[in-house]
Image (spheres, helix red, strand yellow):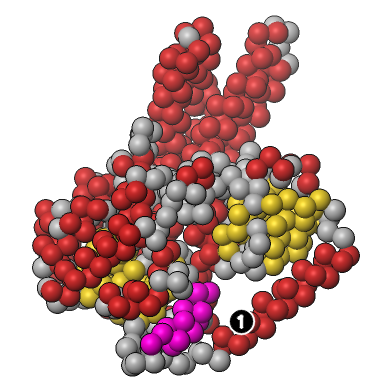
Amino acid sequence: MITIYGKSVCGGVAIGKLMFCKRNEKVIKRTQVEDADAQWQRFLTAKETALSRLKTLYEKALADVGRSNATIFEAYQMMLEDPDYLEYIKNIIRTQHVNAEFAVAAASDHFAQMFSAMDDAYIQGRAADVKDVSGRVLDVLCGGSEGMMEMDEPCIIAADDLAPSETVRLDKSKVLGFATMSGSSNSHTAILARTMNIPAIIGLGEALLEKYDGRAAAIDGFTGTMYIEPDEETVARMKEKQAGDLEQKALLEQLKGKENITKSGRKINVYANIGNVSDVGNVLKNDAGGIGLFRSEFLYLESSDFPTEEQQFSVYKQVAENMAGRKVIIRTLDIGADKQADYFGLDREENPALGYRAIRICLTRPDIFKTQLRALYRAAVFGNISIMFPMIISVDEIHKIKEIIREVKAELTEEGIPFREDVELGIMIETPASVMISRELAKEVDFFSVGTNDLTQYTLAIDRQNAKLDQFYDPHHPAILAMIRMAAENAHAEGAWIGICGELGADLELTEEFLKMGVDELSVSPSMVLPLRKRIRECG
Ligand code: PEP
Ligand code: MG
């Protein structure tokens, strides 16, 4: 048995086979399609994205390793524009009526075989290049930065690290737990593990070897310990711990249906955070009073192209209906920084967390924003939906959002499409700027929701993705608590309510303090709803 240690990001015990995340194993399926032209267009768009990435790589290589070494990326660009290659792909799509992925994979095999069969050693070498270039287009077409593996049986997933776009693509019913070499506690992957309530350990470092792939393993998410080929005694101990955990959960079950009320009678709303319609079952199972944060960008991350208005409408409607009148706060697209979807074609940035993301994308690409707003206003007819906007730093942004909402409503009215007029609007308080002008902002909206993950990152100037900084990342820092207090006072002074939807909302050491500040709502991962209710009921 080998024992390795990391950092726990979600408690619980998992016992099962370890599976290493192999990113380059793309399974390309042949799918018959009606609209061959649409597939050709998909290919052309993906090719453009792959070309622009190659240009970036070329420039980087030029600076890092000089022209002679960088030329390979120029050659790759030429290969992608080669008329024979393009003609071959177009032909397959048009004559066989198949998906673009299949056509690219077929072209890749065809040209690689052709080059390999040549006598000239130089040309033979081009076989690997055509595969590499085609793989880059497939990466774009398959969405996410890389393809993800398929699992036959429930496994503990191991990886160097997982991007949010990869985590959302995993078949969750088959994930027993996560174990990663790097990663930080505040990353979206850690948050996703908590939302899914899956035992997870990060920061196992080099000790997590790829050769453990396929071996039996156990992870203790409470202590951050991982066992490879655990001996009988350890398995028995882990099983016992697992049973104890279930027993604890059963005890918490007794709190279902009870109020979130302190001994002195102060009530507070406890809602849950979700990233997907499939999380709603967990929200209901844990008896949350509503959904305080639906991270709608996960819809975009799961997809290989912009989700259409109809696709979004059907998801939002389903969530609203399943929640049967309970509040559902849907945050508009918060893409960018660590949450990347290739088809957005976003440039690489020096400081992505301070970059082109969230509301900044929505306000400069109103086509994307309007599609989402139309879907939200239409879905609001079917339940108690509120809309929340991320990364706000100014009153002017809210004025612009309201102007776009007016346009959306006018267009829906003109088209005779039903929508709800009076949807509650709120903003995330996750930048120091928004705290400092919270009195002005509160005049404009119905509610605030404090995003403590980003607020901590921006206030303490600590990258939430950087595992090395975890020791400095102090969400209990007096500056953060003072900011929440200030935002709460200003919200209430203008008749708005305030909640916390960042991870700090689930910090039971702070519950009493949040109650004293007058926070009206706490939104936490579904599995934290009942422990939080227990804590609130213990407060004076
Ligand atoms: C936050 O920043 O606290 C938040 C809730 O949003 P996200 O974690 O998705 O950035
Ligand atoms: Mg945030």
Read off the magenta span. Answer: 527-540
Mark 1 = which residue? 249
Q: Residue at x 22, y 66 (%)?
A: 487
Q: Position of residue 455 (x, y in %)?
A: 32, 55
Q: Amino acid at mark 1?
A: Lys
As drawn, 539 above or below 276: below
Look at the magenta stretch and give its main secondary structure.
Answer: helix
Tell me the residue at 17%/57% (across/down): 436
Residue 424 magenta-highlighted: no
Q: Quadrant of residue 377?
A: bottom left
Q: Is residue 142 visible?
A: yes
Q: Residues within 10 Å of mark 1 (few under 14, many from 20)?
A: some
Residue positioned 33% across, 93% down in the render: 265
Q: Nearer the viewer, residue 362 or 250?
A: 250
Residue 262, picture quadrant:
bottom left
Front one among 422 and 205: 205
**Residue 528 falls inside the magenta stretch:** yes
Say what secondary structure mark 1 lies in: helix
Q: Is residue 134 left or right of residue 109?
A: left
Q: Is residue 44 above or below residue 374?
A: above
* Image spot of residue 381 (x, y percent): 27, 78
Residue 17 position, x and y percent, is 77, 57
The reply to whether residue 317 is visible in this rendering is: no
